[in-house]
Amino acid sequence: MLILRKQAGVTLIELMVIVAIIAILSILAIPSYSDWIGNSRLRNGAESVVNGLQLARAEAVRRNTAVQFQLTGAGTTSAWQVGCVAVTATCPANIQSHTVGDGSSATVSFTMVVGGVNPVAFNNLGRTATATSWNVDNTALTAANSRDLRVVVSTGGTVRMCDPNVVAPDTRAC
């Protein structure tokens, strides 16, 4: 009597084909993944600036005095600081500060291009004297792969983040 045995597992050739396919897909995906990481860091930097501006506005209303937001640092050590314009015992010059990015290499660098005034001062009503905006870009990415953002502050004190590459009526447009 003839007994048939089923084959269990995969052959060495099948395993090598699977490894080759995974290697090819990984090589194709790495550039897209690094662009995605760079754009995520860019968005985090822009959101950090928006949060700092909103903090300055809220502190100005809460303390009933002028509070300013200022971008500091350059290159890989971009940072912001929120503090009172008129320093008193109850209103310090540095309410809060934050570093944007980790500053470890060029791939994390953010260039904050000032398109208005720096620092931005909010009065006790949460308004500013002049509208201003900052372009936030990641210099480690090419222009075609970078999704640059802009942080805009209106004279009414409204802070928002927009995409300069999108046109109206899209709500992301500047």
Image: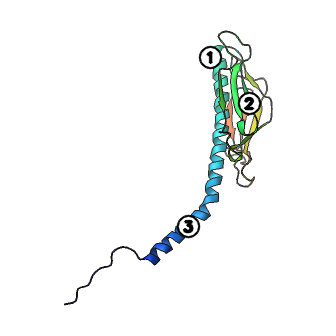
Residue plotted at (80% across, 35% down): 115
Quarter holding the N terminus?
A: bottom left
Q: Are marks 3 and 1 in contact (CB under 8 Å)?
A: no
Residue at the image position 64 percent from the left and 37 percent from the top? 47
Q: Is residue 171 visible?
A: no
Residue 75, placed above or below residue 37: above
Kind of residue sitting beneath label 1: Arg
**Residue wearing tag 2:** 71
The mark lying in front, picked from 1 and 2, is: 2
List the single residue furthest toward the right.
116
Q: Amino acid at mark 3?
A: Ala
- Quick one: which residue is furthest to the left in this view? 1
Q: Residue at label 1?
A: 62
Residues at circles 1 and 2 in contact by the CB criterion of under 8 Å? no
Residue 93, image x and y in percent? 70, 17
Estimate the spatial distance between the alpha carbons at disc 3 and disc 2, rounded to whole Å: 44 Å
Along the viewing direction, whichever of 24 and 166 lies nearer the viewer:
24
Q: Which image quarter: residue 57?
A: top right
Residue 52 at x, y = what percent?
66, 29
Q: Residue at x 64, y 14 (%)?
A: 63
**Which residue bears the numbered disc 3?**
23
Neighbor class of circle 3 (other Cα within 10 Å; few <14, some 14-19, many 20+) is few
For the question of whether residue 43 can be seen, the reply is: yes
The part of the image, by quadrant, that contains residue 32 is: bottom right
102 vs 131: above or below: below
